[in-house]
Image: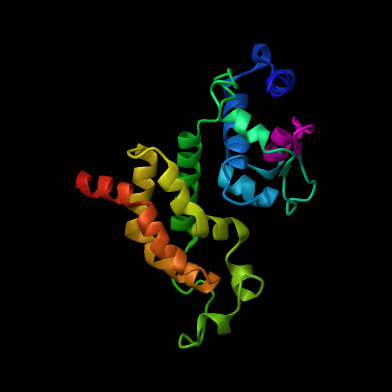
């Protein structure tokens, strides 16, 4: 839509634009329009790899299309689905700096999720003293498990496979992150999704990333 194009050029004018501003737009807005489910601003910042204040600043430039909460636990809302559609369509968004390429945005999120899980998942995260207990006896996302597995880590655990599946096969950064995760973090991830009550997603993820698994296998 022409109105979106004009709006973006008003708040992010090409004349006064630098690489840092474009990079922030791609990371923050690109992440927001690529998410599998809505997340709090703080989680968005973690996934985008930047500070809460910078995320708020980037989104606050677009008040007519995005509702930005003041509370870091509030969820940013896109007013109309036509806006993400515009940003992802090279026939309508003719500004390459503002165009969100889905495969790149998914690759960025895939790398972010994999890095977060590899860095923060560990054995017995919930410090369960009685390992014979069933998962539903430990507590769900709103109880002890939800306090230990933060929202941004929960998102990574539940959606990394979808982002990997939608990234361009062979993306070097995703490939490196995936190899590292498979070597160091996949067992801890299985424990985490089991505690979150989504163990069935593990099997779906393995099917989703089949092409990626093959590409990594052929690398060795």
Is residue 178 depicted above or below 68 in this figure?
Answer: below
Identified at 79% across, 33% down, the residue is 63
At horizontal 56% and vertical 25% (from top left) the residue drawn is 99
Q: Position of residue 149 (x, y in %)?
A: 57, 65
Q: Position of residue 141 (x, y in %)?
A: 62, 70
Q: Which residues are magenta?
A: 54-66
Task: Work out whether residue 198 or residue 56 is closer to the camera in this orientation and state it.
Answer: 198
Q: Front-most of 17 and 193? A: 193
Indicate the colouring scheme: rainbow
Q: Is residue 62 magenta?
A: yes
Q: Residue 183 at x, y = what percent?
A: 32, 58
Residue 12: image quadrant is top right
Q: Is residue 29 visible?
A: yes
Q: Name the residue at the top extreme.
A: 15
159 vs 48: above or below = below
Among the 4 quarters of the image, the one containing residue 215: top left
């Amino acid at each position: 839509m022409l109105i979106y194009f004009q709006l973006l050029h008003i708040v992010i004018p090409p004349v006064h634009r630098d690489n840092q501003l474009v990079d922030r737009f791609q990371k923050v807005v690109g992440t927001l329009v690529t998410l599998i489910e809505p997340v709090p601003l703080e989680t968005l910042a973690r996934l985008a790899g930047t500070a809460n204040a910078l995320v708020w600043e980037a989104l606050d430039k677009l008040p007519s299309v995005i509702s930005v909460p003041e509370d870091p636990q509030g969820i940013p809302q896109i007013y109309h689905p036509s806006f993400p559609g515009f940003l992802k369509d090279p026939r309508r968004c003719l500004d390459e700096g503002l165009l969100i390429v889905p495969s790149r945005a998914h690759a960025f999120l895939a790398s972010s999720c994999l890095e977060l899980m590899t860095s923060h998942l560990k054995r017995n995260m919930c410090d369960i003293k009685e390992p014979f207990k069933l998962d539903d006896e430990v507590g769900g996302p709103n109880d002890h498990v939800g306090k230990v597995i933060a929202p941004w880590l929960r998102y990574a655990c539940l959606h990394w496979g979808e982002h990997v599946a939608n990234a361009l096969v062979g993306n070097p950064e995703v490939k490196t992150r995936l190899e590292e995760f498979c070597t160091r973090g996949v067992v801890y991830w299985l424990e985490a999704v089991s505690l979150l009550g989504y163990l069935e997603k593990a099997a779906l993820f393995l099917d989703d990333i089949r092409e990626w698994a093959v590409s990594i296998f052929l690398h060795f």
